[in-house]
Image (cartoon, rainbow, N blue to C red):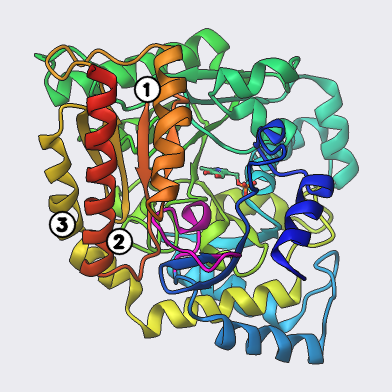
Amino acid sequence: MTATNLQRLARDHLWMHFTRMGGYGAGSDVPIIVRGDGCYLWDENGKRYLDALAGLFSVNIGYGFGEEVGQAALDQMRELPFYTNWSYAHPKAIELAAEVASLAPGDLNRVFFVSGGSEAVESAWKLARQYYAARGEKRTRAALGEPERSHDAIVEASRRGPHPYKAIARHIAYHGTTMGALSINGIPALRTMFEPLVPEVRHVHNTNRYHRPADETEAEFTRFLLDDLEQAILAMGPETVCLVHMEPVQNAGGCFTPPEGYWAGVRALCDEYDILLSADEVITAFGRLGHWFGSERYDIRPDIVTSAKGLSSSYGAIGAVIATDRVMEPFLESTSMYAHGVTFGGHPVMCAIALKNIEIMKREGIVEHVRDTQDVFRAKLETLLDLDIVGDVRGTGFFYAVELVKDKETRATFDDDECESLLRGFLSPALFDAGLICRQDDRGDPVVQISPPLVAGEAEMDEIVGTLGAVLAEASQRMTS
Ligand SMILES: Cc1ncc(COP(=O)(O)O)c(C=O)c1O
């Protein structure tokens, strides 16, 4: 199909996600990416781009393993193109569950497959709700004189009274778009138009330290965050809260890393108030932070982990909810069952792709590569702090954000109109023209997000910093002139 034809068909028929479709009238081309290799992408006109966003924080092995992963998919297609995980198992789902459990820290031993990140988050919240319904029933079993926890008994127990159903997440955090996941989202602009949302979620402070008082110590910041979380739990009623759901490093708002002692404190509060702690590792799992799981990096000890993206390096549509033995325990009774499922959960071809992805990551030493070179990458990015417009560079592993400021001294940020003209009016098109794909985001304060494939080497790091630096220097001039 010719380039012109594709443009016309895209304009007439394709509805792109989170895209201002009205922006693609005559004279403004839809960006059509046709090929990828390593960290690079090519558009329909043959122009090359360095993908410093790894698709959507997700193509961890880069774009160069299509043949090998494709062969694994083809082999599986030939053998068994589809079968379900509803009451049945098949070899690839079993092998992948065992592989993921072996990579996950602690006793995160049980793996429930879904099709992506939103479904994983949705499933985690439902799992937490049903966990307490099942366990609550267990507490009262003796009193009720019931011989065992049947599924019907759990349903009945849920009807009898409000078992814990509320969730807590953090401001500005992104956790997906389906109604449950959206409700957990802490981004007002994404939530408001879909209200009323699923009851009931409260959002607590995230770990953005850049805009905290300059004289606040790290220990004071941690205390402030944990007090805020505890206040939210108490205000909601600890007996009604089933889930605390947070990313090891929060993406939206720009790579908010946790201060010292934060995760130990969150874990302790969850233990104290008997709430399940869920680590949203849709981005951070499978190497992005230099570990297989971010939970390992920060010793989070979650009860539940949600993952997707890097599980298959996005070569296939697969996600997973991973639960500890404790969370699984009430579901192992003879007639008990997690009342949840999706047709494509554990799709054999997706599982074969994910298994091959993990095999490649191990063989190529990709997680070790991130761990070994993250400091080099960070040091290169920090040279951008020489620019007036760059206030902060933060992150870890291959996961960074550069915060843009109007005034470096006061850390004053841009207003909405300035953000619109800076990010969408100038930066987005300028970076794209310069052949660099990264994300300009103002869901919190304006940031540029950098999260390349985990195979990026020093040459790619230099290209990212060089191109970004040149474009930001021009942005700086424009915003001050
Ligand atoms: C932390 C986090 N959770 C959940 C999601 C939703 O994943 P998906 O887009 O696969 O539904 C995302 C997507 O970016 C994410 O970053």
The residue mark sitting in front, 3 or 2, is 3
Residue furthest toward the front?
27
Mark 1 / mark 3, whichever is N-terminal: 3
Which element is circle 1 on? loop
Q: Please rate how many residues cluster around mark 3, counting C-alpha atoms within 10 Å: few if below 14, some from 14 to 19, many from 20.
A: some
Q: Is residue 64 left or right of residue 154?
A: left
Instruction: Write down the residue under mark 2.
Output: 290
Tell me the residue at 71%/35% (across/down).
21
Which element is circle 3 on? helix
Mark 2 / mark 1, whichever is N-terminal: 2
Tell me the residue at 20%/57% (across/down).
377
Res. 292 visible in picture: yes
Q: CA distance from mark 1 to mark 3?
A: 25 Å
Instruction: Write down the residue under mark 1.
Output: 445
Instruction: Write down the residue under mark 3.
Output: 375
263, 294: nearer the viewer = 294
Residue furthest toward the top?
235
The residue range painted magenta reads: 43-60
Q: Position of residue 342 (x, y in %)?
A: 81, 55
Q: Quadrant of residue 354?
A: bottom right
Q: Amino acid at mark 3?
A: Asp
Mark 3 / mark 2, whichever is N-terminal: 2
Q: Is residue 386 left or right of residue 338?
A: left
The residue mark sitting in front, 1 or 3, is 1
Which element is circle 2 on? loop
Q: Position of residue 395 (x, y in %)?
A: 27, 43
